[in-house]
Amino acid sequence: MLRVLVLGGTLDGSHLAQALAQAGVDGIFSYAGRTHAPIVQPLPTRVGGFGGVAGLQAFLLAEKITHVVDATHPFAAQMSSHAVKACASTGVPLLALERPAWQAQSGDAWQHVPDIAAAVQALPAEPARVFLAIGRQHLMPFLACAQHWFLLRLLDPVVDSVLDLPPARGHVVLDRGPFTLEGDRALLQTHRITHVVSKNAGGVGAQAKLTAARERGLPVVLIGRPVIPARPTVSTVNGVLRWMGVVQSY
Ligand code: NAP
C-alpha cells in the first residue's frame, strides 16, 4: 500500500498533491513553513522542518512512508540533500520532481552567475533600477548596494523593519505566481527597470519576467542552481505517477 511524502514548496508540488488526491493515493504533504498563507493542499499537511536528516529518517519510519517525492524548489538544496541521505539510510525510494533549468534564447542578455554573492558583484557600479525576483531570504547583500533602487516581489508582507525600504531605495510588490507576461511587462515599464536578477528556477510560473526583459533588451543576472546529490528525477507529475505505478489519471 502506497503512503507518499511530498516535500512541497513549488507549483509542481501542488499539482502533484492534486493528482495524488484524485488518484486516491494516501500521502502527507510537507511545507517548510516559510509563508504565512501557504496554498491549502488536498492531502493531510504538516508544516516545519523535520529536524535534519535524523528527524526525517524518524519521520519516514514512524509514518510508514513508502515513497518520497522531493518537489521543493531547485534552490532548496539542504532539504533535497537531507532527503537523499534519509531515503538512502531507510531504504525508502526517492524521486525528485524538478523543472528543467531555463535556457537562453535569441535576444536574451543573460549573465550567468554561480551564487548570490556573484549576482551582487554582477550589478553595475553606477546606479541601476533592479527587479530583484529572488524571494526574501537573500535580499540583504543586494540592499547593501546603496546606489541601486530595488523592486522586490515577495509573497508575504515585509515584517522585517530593515526591509522597510524608503521610496528612494525601492518598492515592494506582494504577489504570488504564476505571473503573467502582461503583468511583468507592466512592472518593468512602470518602475523603469534597468536590470533583472533571478534564480534559474525553470518552469513557467516565474518565466514571464525573462520574456519581458528580452522584449525590452534588459540585462538579466541569472543565478545558477546549487549542486544537489544525484537522485532520480522527473520533470512532470505524470512521470511521478508512473514511477509509483499509479495509473495515469491526471
Ligand atoms: P532549504 O535551505 O533546502 O531548507 C532549509 C530547511 O528547511 C531544511 O533543512 C528543512 O529543515 C526545512 N525544509 C525545507 N523545505 C521543507 C519542506 N518542504 N518540508 C519540511 N521542511 C522543509 O530550503 P529553503 O531554500 O529554505 O526553502 C524552503 C522552502 O521554500 C522549500 O520547501 C522550497 O521548495 C520553498 N522555496 C524555496 C525557494 C528558494 O529559492 N530557496 C524558492 C521558492 C520556494 P530540517 O532540516 O529541520 O528538516
Image (cartoon, grey):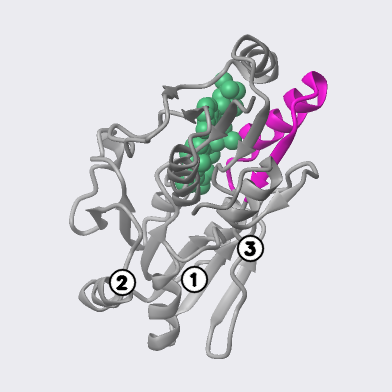
Which residue bears the numbered disc 2? 184
Residue labelled 2 has its Cβ within 8 Å of some atom of ligand 1: no
Q: Earlier in the sequence, mark 2 or mark 1?
A: 1
The numbered mark at residue 124 is 1
In the displayed orientation, state which residue is furthest to the bottom.
106
Q: Is residue 8 visible?
A: yes
Number of other residues with Cα within 10 Å of mark 1, as a class: few under 14, some 14 to 19, many 20 or more: few
| Distance between mark 1 and mark 3 Cα atoms | 29 Å
SS under mark 3: loop
Which residues, given as a range, are shown in magenta? Answer: 75-97
What type is the residue that disc 3 sits on? Pro
Q: Position of residue 190 (x, y in %)?
A: 20, 75
Which residue bears the numbered disc 3? 100
Q: Earlier in the sequence, mark 1 or mark 3?
A: 3
Q: Can you tell which quarter of the image residue 86 is in? A: top right
Magenta residues, dominant SS class = helix
The numbered mark at residue 230 is none
Q: Position of residue 222 (x, y in %)?
A: 56, 66
Comparing labels 2 and 1, the label whose residue is closer to the camera: 2
Q: Position of residue 150 (x, y in %)?
A: 33, 60
What type is the residue that disc 2 sits on? Asp
Comparing labels 1 and 3, the label whose residue is closer to the camera: 3
SS under mark 1: loop
| Distance between mark 3 and mark 2 Cα atoms | 22 Å
Position of 147 with respect to 187 (left or right) is right
Q: Position of residue 77 (x, y in %)?
A: 64, 40
